[in-house]
Image: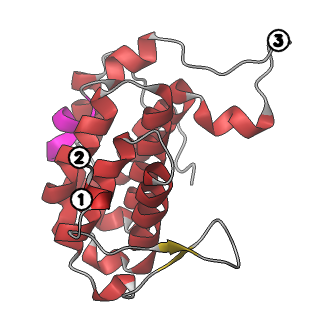
Amino acid sequence: MTTFTTDLSPRPLPSKASSLRLQWYVHPTKLDYRVVLPLFLEGLREVKDPYRYLAVRGSMDLIASCPSKLMACVPFLLPPLKRALDTRHPLILATSLTVLQEFILADPSRIGPALVPHYHQLLGASAVINKQTYGNEDRKGEMASSQRRLCVTDLMNETLTLLEITGGRDAFLHIRYMVPTYDSVLQQGVRSIW
């Protein structure tokens, strides 16, 4: 039984107006993010719908709804994100990296530096991911437009760049320790990508 089939989490329902939104029984800003957000992040390892849909949409909704609550959640979010990244399953990796990027971008000046001491947890699988090819190419050798965000290697590079840009002075050294092949974008003269 998964977390989403128990009574431990709020039950968002797909909205009748749009399949891309959730209808919450309780507004996300009124929830205890330290409890609820890690539950949704645990669901990122799901590959079957509706569990995957609930995990991804629920995580994104919580992140977007109240960025001010995210800093207090950092220690609670690392274990489920690490477990998702450690699966090395392309769909789970792509989803987890996208959620991690949204998490950082919700409050980059605070969350970026707060993650630096935890890079060893988040970036353990990064070196392996950067060596493997996870691209989704069609027969012509070009990536289909709907699958561009599923190219895990590109997503990992974007995430590493985002971590470096938002992490402060020591971010590059911590990233380079975990991913020796990473090249600094800041040292190359790129000031901001986002």
Q: Main secondary structure of the magenta part?
A: helix
Span colored in magenta: 117-123
Judge whether residue 89 is colored magenta. no
Q: Say which label, 1 or 2, has the lower sequence index.
A: 1
| Local SS, label 2 | helix
In depth, the one of 90 and 122 nearer the eye is: 90
In depth, the one of 165 and 65 nearer the eye is: 65
Label 2 crowding class (10 Å Cα cut-off): few <14, some 14-19, many 20+? many
The residue drawn where x is 69% and y is 34% is 147
| Local SS, label 1 | helix
Q: Could you give the CA–CA distance between mark 1 and mark 2, rounded to whole angstroms?
A: 7 Å
Q: Say which label, 1 or 3, has the lower sequence index.
A: 1
Would you identify the image quadrant in which residue 130 lies?
top left
| Identity, as a three-letter code, of the amino acid under mark 3 | Arg
Q: Say which label, 2 or 3, has the lower sequence index.
A: 2
The residue drawn where x is 41% and y is 43% is 96
Q: Could you give the CA–CA distance between mark 1 and mark 3, rounded to whole angstroms?
A: 39 Å
In depth, the one of 83 and 109 nearer the eye is: 83
Label 1 crowding class (10 Å Cα cut-off): few <14, some 14-19, many 20+? many
Q: Disc 3 marks which residue? A: 139
Task: Point out which mark residue 12 bears.
Answer: none
Report x, y in % for residue 133.
54, 13
Q: Disc 1 marks which residue? A: 38
Report x, y in % for residue 39.
25, 59
The residue drawn where x is 46% and y is 49% is 52
Q: Could you give the CA–CA distance between mark 2 and mark 3, rounded to whole angstroms?
A: 35 Å
| Local SS, label 3 | loop
Question: In the rendered image, is residue 105 in sight?
Answer: no
